[in-house]
Amino acid sequence: MKFIQSFVLKSFVVLGLVTPVWAQNAPDYGELHGNFQIDAQYYNPDSAIGAPPVPEKMRMNSFVNLIYTRGKVTAGVRYESYLNTILGFDPRYKGNGIPFRFVNYANDGLDVTLGSFYEQFGSGIVLRTYEERGLGYDNAFDGARVKYSPIKGIYLKGLIAKQRVFFDLSDGIVRGFDGEIALNELVPKLNDKPTKVYLGGSFVSKFQQDQDPIFVLPENVGAWSYRLKINRNKIAVLAEYSQKINDPGLVNQLKDKPNYNPGQAAYLSGSYSTKGLGISLAAKLIDNMNFRSDRGATGNNALINFLPALTRQHTYNLAATIYPYATQPNGEIALQGEIIYTIKKGSWLGGEYGTNVIVNYSSANGLDTAISAEGFTYTTNFSKAGQAYFKDLNIEISRKLNKNLKATFFYANFVYNKDVVQGLTGFGTIYSNIEVIDVTWKMNSKHAIRFELEGLQTKTDMGDWAAALVEYTIAPKWFFATLTQYNYGNPVEAMRLLYPTFTMGYIQNATRLTIGYGRQRAGIFCVGGICRNVPASNGLTLSVSSSF
């Protein structure tokens, strides 16, 4: 296996060296493109912040993608190396290998892929695979996929595959079919109509042998969904509903017994946008929709579907990293609404350049359930919400004070059930407020400096926090930043610690080099409701990335 991987990788490197020479006389020999990234971290001992010991002193995550295209055929590989995995990523990413390789053919509405690929049906409620390298998340399929459009307006997909689990594959086999009708494309008379209608449906099943010595577990588990999307001028609406048969697993157990309840999910969103105003509303219901190709998998492993978190994706440090929300696949009811409004320039509130205002509210509650007498199923009272998991009310006001100065004020109120969201005990529900002042001064066409002050107040958990950021940019190549977090309100005096970091970077065309040094506090890092735990650390970080 190692010989094959080495041969494939060297072959693509050779192709990359000789392709430019071939291209001078024979451009039809194709093109080679790709990108790579190396992330390394050197660790210092720091018992004060609880940093775990690192015997290797330095660890590294890296990858290189090579994509070769000629005519209607595309082939690619990704080589990954973890020596050893950077803290905070699953240690089962260890060693070297080629976990992702594929060949694709596309012609006249037919698209065939063999090998590794990512796919999504509808909004992803029954099937979505993707990679989020910052989370160490990669649930790619490995198998075969066919896309076909027999006539304009009808789009079909079919696949059969296993899923990536680190450098191996999950036990289960996933089969799926998706169809979508673009009504306006299918019916020529509707082509010019302002209302665009899309209808879709999906069916996904996974097969895994039942090897449980006590309980009878379903070996074939099916899930299906129906969706409708309507766009008309400034309005867009999306609705999707899905169901899944009973699927007992390690994550959705009812106390100490398998969970034989079926699953269901509903998702509804709508938006309106016009000049100076944008409004979006979304709601979802999730009931026992943990769907994996391996019933024994936990964490982010072998997930077939994706359940989006209806929460704002915060960018400010304390709002994004202290109490981030992770989707609860076993059951939740969530809502989100957002208004984006631009106060016209020239008015007293709008000023010379106008003022942008964003108001956002999101909430997530558990389901009101009652476990049956035998303990293998439960009933749900959908007329009543369960305990509060998360609430976030925030407002952001941005205004350009003059041609060189811009200021942003941000406020958020959080309600955070730490025991549920992080799977802990003894913390309960935490109430907090966060304020941010963000000022950017553009000194001239190349030089800019940004100041950011943040505060978080809470009477429970780790107490109050403060953060300060100074970022200096010399366009288009250099940037320097220093960030300090201070847990000044921690009830344990010895834990009232500073977490300073310094970062600098250099950008040259498609190449980016970043060096950082400082302390990293323990916490959770989330993207789109998918999270990973990040342990405390102290040391030097280095990142190099480029594309060609």
Image (cartoon, grey):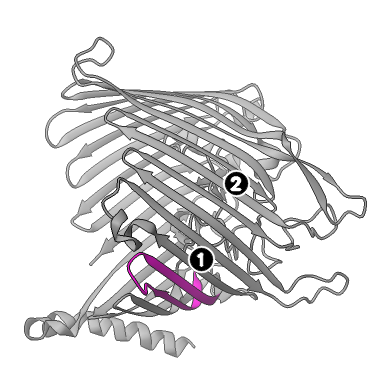
Mark 2: which amino acid? Thr
Task: Tell me: 100 left or right of 49.
Answer: left
Mark 2 Cα within 10 Å, few/some/many (few <14, many 20+)? many
Q: Which mark is residue 262?
A: none
Q: Is residue 204 magenta?
A: no
> In terms of sequence position, does the residue under pointer 2 or pointer 1 come before the other?
1
User: SS for tag 2?
Assistant: loop
Query: Residue at label 2?
Result: 327
Query: Residue at label 1?
Result: 84
User: 409 or 191, which lies in front?
Assistant: 191
Task: Tell me: 369 left or right of 537.
Answer: right
Q: Position of residue 537 (x, y in %)?
A: 52, 47
Residue 137 in view, yes or no: no
Mark 1 Cα within 10 Å, few/some/many (few <14, many 20+)? some
Residue extending furthest right? 373
Between circles 2 and 1, the one closer to the viewer is 2
Q: Position of residue 146 (x, y in %)?
A: 43, 77
Residue at image coords 64%, 21%: 459
Give me the C-alpha separation between circle 2 and circle 1.
29 Å
Q: Position of residue 313 (x, y in %)?
A: 46, 40
Above or below 473: residue 304: below
Which quadrant would residue 510 be assigned to in this image?
Answer: bottom left
Which quadrant would residue 226 be assigned to in this image?
Answer: bottom right
Residues under numbered marks 2 and 1 in contact, where contact means CB atoms less than 8 Å apart: no
Residue 478 in view, yes or no: yes
Residue at image coords 17%, 34%: 447
- Magenta span dominant secondary structure: strand
Q: Magenta part of the protein: which range?
A: 140-161
Residue extending furthest top? 348
Q: Position of residue 385 (x, y in %)?
A: 71, 34
